[in-house]
Image (cartoon, rainbow, N blue to C red):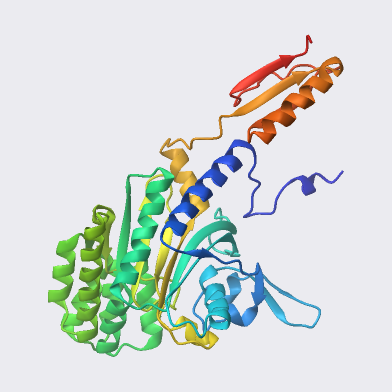
Amino acid sequence: MNQKILHTPEGVRDIYGDECERKQIIEQKLHAVLTSYGYRDIETPTFEFFDVFGSDVGTIPSRDLYKFFDREGNTLVLRPDFTPSIARAAGRYFAESDRPVRLCYLGKTFVNHQEHRGRLKENTEIGAELIGEGSADADAEIIAMATDMLLASGLSDFQISIGHAAFFESLVREAGIDDETVEHLRILIHNHNTFGVEKLLSDKNIDERIARILISLPVMNGTVQMLEKAYDMTQGLKAQRAVLRLKEVLRLLEISGLDSHVSFDFGMLSTYMYYTGIIFRGYTYGTGDAVVKGGRYDNLLGHFGRETPSAGFVVVLGNLMNALQRQKISVPMETDRVLILYTSKSRDEAHRLAAGMRKEGRCAELILKDGKSLPEEMTGYSQILDLWQT
């Protein structure tokens, strides 16, 4: 037998046993939070037409997509990002809706990372999209929901870092920086490379005040005091409006009692180019990557025929599970599992007993002894019934 077929390709893995059960329990807890906010489930296809995730949408770069062809020659893509899929579905099914649409989902995403060895290429994500609402209340709602989901998972030590896409965009447009330099600048700030930003701008003929702000962006993070500092630093109306929006969102989170998990990061620049307003990520120790990612995307649905403001986020289940494990946070598992050990002589009794338990909603597992040795470990059961001697 070819031993290679027993292994998975790079970037994907099997999940089974207790780990799989814990994951399913966490999924149920997170989903309960989503429905408590009034969100309803939607399922979109695992693969879609290439144009749903094309470069003009502003999602994952084409080189990182899993692409293939159907019988008609259309280019198809394994879903790398839920948001464009939900936007496409909303443009088709909710185009005439005169009220906000709240949708939630659970499924897999697929990204063919090339330069990030060791990262999974298949991830389970659970998230939500609030479509048709452009207020600060909507921004606060999705951040509050993400926070409540992390709390429901068992995490307590985490931080939701919030930025605003318009703050950076306002600065570079006010400075008149060309698009190529803007993209280079975006990467440097995303990587917190203050020296690189300073060097890049040193030979650019831009306003010294704006240059100082851009150079400081990689380290412009903190609590509410950072909002005041950011507002005072800039004179651009659009940038100031972004700060005022963050202040309003913070006030609403304070009312909900969730502001203690919030901080602000003006150097947060998402690789998803469709974000137009708030951007946020949730971090905790035990994993280097964000466990929550989201933001506002007011122009995205226009690609699918419906101009309407929207916002959303996802929880990356793998990152969350890693954090829970490394922080030694236990996930309570089903304990009412009964193991029934029996022989051929006690077969009828064992099957009747198991059937009765299952009708009561209990878990009953049967093991036939005849000619077999007793398993060395029989853990995870609330009760073991030995009918061997019957």
The percent coordinates of residue 46 (x first, y second) are 65, 67
Give the camera-side residue of 334 and 212: 334
Position of 65 relative to 29 (above/below): below
224 to the left or right of 16: left
Can residue 216 be seen here? no
Q: Indicate left or right for 183 with 88 as reference.
A: left
Residue 68 lies, in percent from the top left, at 72, 73
Q: How many marks?
A: 0
Among the 4 quarters of the image, the one containing residue 218: bottom left
Position of the C terminus, as image quadrant, is: top right
Residue in the image at 40% along x and 42% along y = 154
Q: Return the residue nearer the eye: 187 or 26.
A: 26
Specify the quadrant that holds the N terminus: top right
Q: Residue 260 placed where, x, y %?
A: 24, 53
Q: Is residue 134 in view?
A: yes
Horizontal side, residue 362 vs residue 183: left or right: right
* Residue occupying the point 44% across, 42% down: 324
**Viewed as shown, does residue 308 lie left or right of 358?**
left
